[in-house]
Image (tube, grey):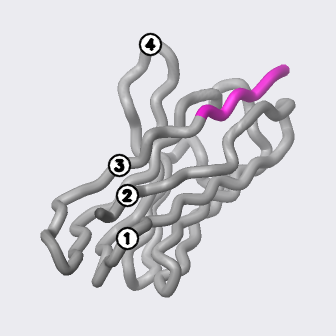
Amino acid sequence: QAQLEESGGGLVQAGGSLRLSCAARGSIFTINAMGWYRQAPGKQRELVAVVSSGGSTNYADSVKGRFTISRDNAENTVYLQMNSLSKEDTAVYYCYAKSVTTPVRNYPERWGQGTLVTVSS
């Protein structure tokens, strides 16, 4: 119930672009915020970008102007368009959903399994 399925990761050269997608599967009533976190090797997981159900967005300073988060509420899907990628963006990217309500139960948060983004020089 309310599983998050990510796609779109892979290998890209520096300066290139990738688009990540994350769909919340199952019978879902509402999702508050959706977003993306990332964790690079040897580092803590950090927020990349988040979008509220109303469309308000917030970005990490390191990705402002390069990444764009968007959301399709009807499809319970969130996207992350990543442009001008650098080696510093190499990480496992995790999809996140906050306050998910379903017919069975409510979840304070849900996480995807992660998708690897590797930027080569």
User: Which quadrant is the N terminus positioned in?
Assistant: bottom left
Magenta stretch secondary structure, dominant: strand
Q: Amino acid at mark 4?
A: Gly
Which numbered disc, 3 or 4, marks the residue closer to the eye? 3
At 49% from the left and 86% from the top, the residue drawn is: 74
Q: Secondary structure at mark 1?
A: loop
Horizontally, is 121 left or right of 30 in the view? right
Classify mark 3: residues with Cα within 10 Å, few (<14), some (14-19) or many (20+).
many
Query: Which badge, 2 or 1, is on the more N-terminal residue?
Result: 2
Q: Which residue is mark 4?
A: 42
From the top left corner, tell me how far across and down residue 51 is, in percent: 44, 69
Q: Are marks 2 and 1 in contact (CB under 8 Å)?
A: yes
Is 52 situated above or below 92?
A: below
Which numbered disc, 1 or 3, marks the residue closer to the eye? 1
Query: Which badge, 1 or 4, is on the more N-terminal residue?
Result: 1
Q: Which residues are magenta?
A: 116-121
Q: Is residue 97 magenta?
A: no
Q: Nearer the viewer, residue 23 or 58?
A: 23
Q: Amino acid at mark 3?
A: Trp
Q: Is residue 120 visible?
A: yes
User: Which quadrant is the C terminus positioned in?
Assistant: top right
Q: Which residue is mark 3?
A: 111
Query: In the rendering, which numbered label is found on residue 26?
Result: 1
